[in-house]
Amino acid sequence: MRARTSRLVAAAVAAGTVGAMAVPMAAGSATAAEGEPPVRFMPPNTVLSEADPADVGLDPGPIDAAVAQVRAHEELPADGGYALYPGAVGLMGYEGRIVATDASGDALAYGDEGVPLPADERVPMREDTIFDMASVTKLFTSIAVTQLVEDGLVELDEPVATYLPAFAANGKEEVTVRQLLTHTSGFVAWLPLWSRYPDEESRIAAVMAQPLDDPPGTVYRYSDLNLITLGVLVEELRGAPLDEVVADRVTGPLGMTDTGFNPTEVDRTAATEYQATPPRGVVRGEVHDENAWSLGGVAGHAGIFSTAGDMAVLAQALLNGGAYDGARILSPQSVRQMVTDFNTEFPGDEHGLGFELNQRWYMDAMSGPRTAGHTGYTGTSLVVDFEADAFAILLTNRVHPSRSSGSINVARREWARGLAYAQGVEPRRGDDAWLSGDANATTSTLTAPVDVPAGGARLGFDLYLDTESTDPLHLESSADGGDTWTPLPFTVRDRGTATEWDGVVAGSGTRRWTQARADLPAGEILVRWRATTDGGYLGRGVLVDGVVARGPGGTLLDGESSPDAFDADGWRLVNR
């Protein structure tokens, strides 16, 4: 390993801000953000083993569908060009069991200038193929920083300049460690360090000297510079290079033998881009990110390589509260803090300490307040669902041979959705419940006639709602046989809290049944549940169960005993 801690001293000299190292501060508080749902953990001695999905209560159908969908993206388009990615390895874990692992396509498929290789020169993808994890590296750096907090060497709300005096340059003296971890520092998103500066020392000095684009804490902007800085902070306080720190304190204790910077088994690695500028040819076994490459392959924002199996161990260690197979890398309190949303002032950009939270654009139906993860530019992703004790890992070489093939978020969503849908939702009453559907850009209706007496009636039903905000459920009534429809206001009661809705509701985050009530107008009416989805993202959908309408004279509609009373268009009865 190279001695790299001297880079900070050289950077400080270049920036003209050499100063004495401050005395380490006490560890920061691990209290969850106000209103944050609690995160529970599995037993710390949980060790992964394999199981068929059905053996742990999962429906294998959605998992099989996800496998087929991920593989389909490896097909070359009919009009020419590259596939979305040449190959992939996907892995799903549930309640301590690995329930799906699939390797498909090629780890190496193209040569120089993106020319397809002959079949006998291609390298097929394997379950243990090593991938450039790109920005998933940020999670390892964040864990290393959190370990510093545990050891009392860092306080989250202390200025970064307390530990890296050079960082105070150009108005950054108030930026805190927490703001770097949550991408609220005000830094610019990216700098071309590799091409603008001649060596590692000057590149680090440029980060230390870079001014902010916005005052700290006023904006969310995802920035590689945040984690590059934190990587330097880890090196400075540990007195060792970042790759050694991660190996000694994270991957080594967890037994992640295929995970680290600058891999030595190049033949097992998935190729990434063919690069003419800089002139690197087909990049394989070296980090794809040019800035990380120019920093010797070791940086806080990119550079880690790993396998699906090793990432599964990390995911399970997080679900276990920071421990795996007798080794502990974090306390439960620290893991809870890493997956607590500290970005409540920036809705839609939920973020813990390094971890992204509740991001439906790649977590899909696994998303929720207690779901954490990250993606990598090379085509990698990790989703950890603490509520379901589940994780989904999808690793692809989507930048091979070109980064212009497009986003693979659709594949990430399909893989996560497969695991989420395999879990299903237990009906609230009886053997089945009505499900609105599981497709984008659709409208589905569930309609039932009710003859309401002059005194009116009360409609009640159980409601399970897990949708994005733009996929609403409408409750409506019609007094003219369905020619026109009127919103039907209703109340949703959830654990003692009642919320009034004007006939339209959407949302997610609870993953539990609630109780809905509405007053029905007198007359021979139709009641309709209308669910609409846009072309964006999906959740677990809308489920309705236990529909009952009662008037002064008794029961007018009982959905449990008379399911044939409903006219379902797009809705279907499901038993899980």
Image (cartoon, helix red, strand yellow):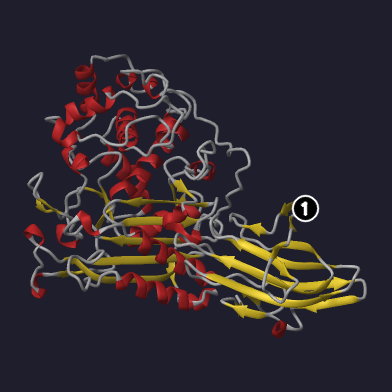
x, y percent for residue 59: 51, 76
* Quarter placement of the C terminus: bottom right
Q: Is residue 59 above or below residue 154?
A: below
Is 213 above or below relative to 505?
Answer: above
67 or 507, which is in the foreground? 507
As drawn, 10 above or below 403:
above
Looking at the image, residue 72 sits to the left or right of residue 539; the answer is left
Provide residue 319's location: percent of width, then percent of height: 50, 54
Is 568 on the left-hand or right-hand side of 87? right
**Where's residue 345, x and y in %?**
53, 36
Where residue 122 sits, quadrant-wise, is: bottom left
Q: Is residue 221 visible?
A: yes
The mark tally for this picture is 1
Q: Which residue is mark 1?
A: 496
Dot 1, crowdedness within 10 Å: few (<14), some or many (≥20)? few
Can residue 97 be seen in this snapshot? no
Res 71 → quadrant: bottom left
Residue 143 vs 553, above or below: the answer is above
**Which residue appears at 46% of the width and 60% of the height?**
537
Amino acid type, residue under disc 1 in the picture: Gly
In this picture, residue 292 sits left or right of residue 438: left
Residue 320 x/y as whole percent: 50, 54
State the residue in front, 4 or 494: 494
- Residue located 31% across and 51% down the image: 376
For the N terminus, the image quarter is top left
Secondary element at tag 1: loop
Residue at point 42% right, 20% down?
A: 174
